[in-house]
Amino acid sequence: MDTYCHATLNYASLIGASPTEVAILNGRQASGLGWEENGFELVEHATALDAFDDLDADSPHYDEIGQLARELTGCDATLYYPALVRSPETAARSADLAPIEFVHSEYT
């Protein structure tokens, strides 16, 4: 896989931030990435959603992604948590919704 770009990412630790230069690879050039082996998978998916910054409880996005998850996994049902939209605007309403400044993972 070719390097897409280089970036300095902030990794958090008990002693503070640790800026680290990393190569960003283009996952679209990889082959054989599957969610069962790698924990993620890049798939083509068209959406009816116009904007990803306004995901309310009635958004069609949740049903679309639930259907895609059922197709990929063979499961019978899916549950979702409402999306967290992080931006300067949402941070002004609640500090918990401020943009994340450190490398992290979110799993449910």
Image (spheres, grey):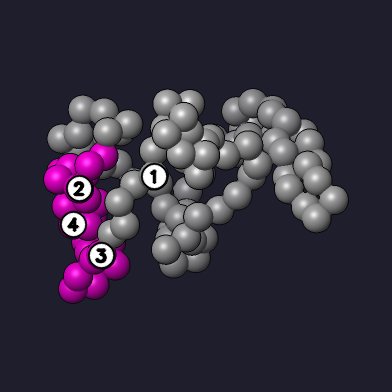
Amino acid type at circle 3 is Leu
Closer to the observer: label 2 or label 4?
2
Q: Earlier in the sequence, mark 1 or mark 2?
A: 2
Q: Quote the CA–CA distance across marks 1 and 2.
A: 12 Å
Amino acid type at circle 4 is Gln
Q: Quote the CA–CA distance across marks 2 and 3.
A: 12 Å
Q: Quote the CA–CA distance across marks 3 and 4.
A: 11 Å
SS for callout 4: helix
- Seen as rendered, the residue at the extreme bottom is 76
SS for callout 1: loop
- The answer to which quarter of the image holds residue 17 is top right
SS for callout 2: loop
Residue 67's disc number: 4
**Quadrant (top left/top right/bottom left/bottom right) for the C terminus:** bottom left
Judged left or right of residue 16, residue 7 is left
Q: Which residue is disc 1 drawn over?
A: 84
Q: Which residue is disc 2 drawn over?
A: 57
Which residues are the magenta region? 55-79
Closer to the observer: label 2 or label 3?
2
Q: Which of marks 2 and 4 is nearer the N terminus?
A: 2
- The answer to which quarter of the image holds residue 81 is bottom left
> Does 56 appear in magenta?
yes
